[in-house]
Amino acid sequence: MEGKTGNTTDDEEEEEVEEEEDDDEDSGAEIEDDDEEGFDDEDEFDDEHDDDLDTEDNELEELEERAEARKKTTEKQSAAALCVGVGSFADPDDLPGLAHFLEHMVFMGSLKYPDENGFDAFLKKHGGSDNASTDCERTVFQFDVQRKYFKEALDRWAQFFIHPLMIRDAIDREVEAVDSEYQLARPSDANRKEMLFGSLARPGHPMGKFFWGNAETLKHEPRKNNIDTHARLREFWMRYYSSHYMTLVVQSKETLDTLEKWVTEIFSQIPNNGLPRPNFGHLTDPFDTPAFNKLYRVVPIRKIHALTITWALPPQQQHYRVKPLHYISWLVGHEGKGSILSFLRKKCWALALFGGNGETGFEQNSTYSVFSISITLTDEGYEHFYEVAYTVFQYLKMLQKLGPEKRIFEEIRKIEDNEFHYQEQTDPVEYVENMCENMQLYPLQDILTGDQLLFEYKPEVIGEALNQLVPQKANLVLLSGANEGKCDLKEKWFGTQYSIEDIENSWAELWNSNFELNPDLHLPAENKYIATDFTLKAFDCPETEYPVKIVNTPQGCLWYKKDNKFKIPKAYIRFHLISPLIQKSAANVVLFDIFVNILTHNLAEPAYEADVAQLEYKLVAGEHGLIIRVKGFNHKLPLLFQLIIDYLAEFNSTPAVFTMITEQLKKTYFNILIKPETLAKDVRLLILEYARWSMIDKYQALMDGLSLESLLSFVKEFKSQLFVEGLVQGNVTSTESMDFLKYVVDKLNFKPLEQEMPVQFQVVELPSGHHLCKVKALNKGDANSEVTVYYQSGTRSLREYTLMELLVMHMEEPCFDFLRTKQTLGYHVYPTCRNTSGILGFSVTVGTQATKYNSEVVDKKIEEFLSSFEEKIENLTEEAFNTQVTALIKLKECEDTHLGEEVDRNWNEVVTQQYLFDRLAHEIEALKSFSKSDLVNWFKAHRGPGSKMLSVHVVGYGKYELEEDGTPSSEDSNSSCEVMQLTYLPTSPLLADCIIPITDIRAFTTTLNLLPYHKIVK
């Protein structure tokens, strides 16, 4: 459970609404479903990943921001992290969620710095951010800030652990933030599955506790039972926040002596109560119960069929030098010839498989370690789930018979060693967070490497873990909407519907017997993609600071920059294959998505070895073209790139694969639409971007049915006429780079486009006034609502864009303080600077719940916040204004931590055809020229009588919202509307007199003027 949300600027996440399979790799396909959104909170709503097809959010709007945001959040800041060696396992039975609640409460002011939001305000002012998270046996706090303010930030932060105030009044309000976090977590299948799994533990074992906490467990129940939560929080803090089981990591450019002096001076006041650290190691075998080893049918929120097979093993942490589960999951999760997934894909039963141990406290702690294999099934695979499980058991039996193989272990070790040796730096705040946890887990000499390297080959340790993975000890969980109506049980906290049954007799008997092996399953062959040449190449052309266009023909162009800064033997190759065909109709957009997903499916097996050898690839169905991204050690990278282009040139599909991918795509689109935050974005962009096809249009086109013939003729036409734009950076010469473009042109042999094509949409000009589009959420029973108020600015210059960024940065902390801390409207509240296809604007978003607030009340509160903010900036001192300007300049000046960041920023300029590679320098120049009155006048200009406002409400289900017939809506039915269409809701008297309702988007937008195509480059 993450604690606070991080800051949100305009980082619009290009990077995936990733779903499961990718685990932590970058390979696979994504559908690029429009634009953006930044919540750079780590928990990003739900971190689940079960859909094989991922969708990517993109659109120019946010495209721009990405690079920016990356720049912003990963500059070389000073950072610190502290890990307390205690977590939710220590929750008292009568106050579930207390550890998580305490993690929230220590932020709310201290004796030395009593201001409730003081630490956040200090960080925001100096370009920093903070977060915290509670796990089963650890609680981690971390922050980063500009180096100049690091010492003061450390002192403010240390007070959380020295003397937090935790005043009664703050407790009542912060319970609401914890409750909102719980409400946001409820519709996540990953969280629901975890909660259900925990409930299978032996009675009294801490795995069965409710770690999240909510208003019920932390406010209403305690009140009823005369429990003083305030006193109990203090007591928990005194007992468990003791210095002798805390670990601290600080990273900054000061000398080590200086840092040591600061730490001693600041942190030595943290109390040490001398009491033994709580230990749960004696509570082994939490799942040695009759409830385990059954078949659990579960009704998921999203559309998905998935089978998860789980074993509970003795704790494996002490075997970190061998990493037995890493060895086993490497084989089980392999996708090449002879693997489980290869076999299941050929049968069209599965789309993805993910196996292993996620190393979260829930999956690995002092009481047990989990080993689980999750398989995303097709409709057909769901019908054969017992055969799918049997295939897994046959593979494991084959491994048990063969025993551990040194060749395989050494191959994994070599890959991990290469990766470690040539790893790029990570963001300081992530690094310190990781290290302070490692200090709790590993002996001193292995703190830096313990979680990454394989140190010694011990076949007996691997064998011992492997031999426990037998069918008799496995638990099966089958997720599918088809279970609806068959599930009579309900999990207490998340309301998950499930049923328990014994494994079918015939299968149980087969699995208990000495069953035969499957001849199609075998160990992977030796990997030909592992790099052996790590030489850094010499320049074959003049060195440049920014990418240079080295090829320019009617068919395409290539940008190139040889790396001379990071000096690692890696390269990044990115290509954009642009075609006007994609946006011609909703059906074309869908055919394009199907094409990219089938291409990825076809590549999965042949490209898997490259993937394992840390050569990563991703194919993205962009809005205006196919994006191909390849990166990794440059030695064997061309092999992978050529493989992808060969498969693209010879694209084909069988009817079975076509059916399987289209069925899955229906689920993917559906799963995007049932999330209030993605639906809100879809609606907003549908209004603003003319000629955009919404996710609902796409879902409709897919449901109306498309044929394999239509796909093949679409692909043929797509490949016949293109404009190809590429960027190559890293350890590659210019001559080698030209070969990549040449390979694409020669292989695909296409005609150039007849005319230049804009890679953006045209945007409508909103009329003056406050427009409101209010629609119902599509997941019945989900209480979450999303309210966004957007102000359109227009076609603006780079200077004005930078001023807007500064404005939003000023807004962040007061916005959080007013809408979350004081008004307790929701857990996610944030302002965003928006660049929608080149048109500037800003917005404020609040995620709330219909069980607590009506969306129009929230809209009014946002207006109230903006009025108070106007007063706030008018009263800003020159000094405070300059501090914020400096903070933004520092963020933009900060150096990249790794080559990928620089490439992302440059690629953003290429893919949007803006080519302003020195954008940051121009923005810094602009920032230096602003005065406080510029900021105030700019804000006022957007708020005056001529202002162009658009509110988008996606309304959840709960007593504060009405059904169309005027009765309160209920939040318990957990079913989704099968018919995916927008239901427009009427405006209540609360806003009726001051807004113009939009009750038909297409009818509204056809009456509006279109703004010219615009890029923010001057």
Image: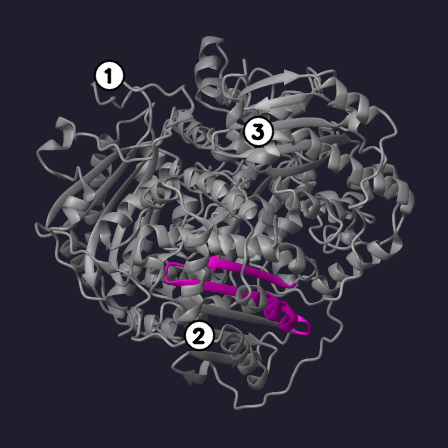
Mark 2, residue position = 750
Q: Which residue occupies 16% across, 54% down?
A: 942
- Give the magenta range: 615-644
Distance between the Cα atoms at labels 2 and 1? 59 Å
Secondary element at image label 1: loop
Rendering coords of residue 89 (x, y %): 65, 27
Mark sitting earlier along the chain (2/3): 3
Q: Which mark is residue 479?
A: 3
Residue 231, above or below 370: above
Q: Which mark is residue 967?
A: 1
Mark sitting earlier along the chain (2/1): 2
Q: Is residue 478 left or right of residue 681?
A: right
Q: Amino acid at mark 3?
A: Leu
Q: 393 or 778, which lies in front? A: 393
Q: Which residue occupies 39% across, 35% down?
A: 674
Secondary element at image label 2: loop
Residue 1009, above or below 964: below
Distance between the Cα atoms at labels 3 and 1? 33 Å
Q: For the N terminus, give its image quadrant.
A: top right
Q: Is residue 406 left or right of residue 563?
A: right
Quadrant in the rendering for residue 170: top left
Mark sitting earlier along the chain (3/1): 3
Q: Is residue 997 left or right of residue 645?
A: left
Residue 862, above or below 524: above
Distance between the Cα atoms at labels 2 and 3? 45 Å
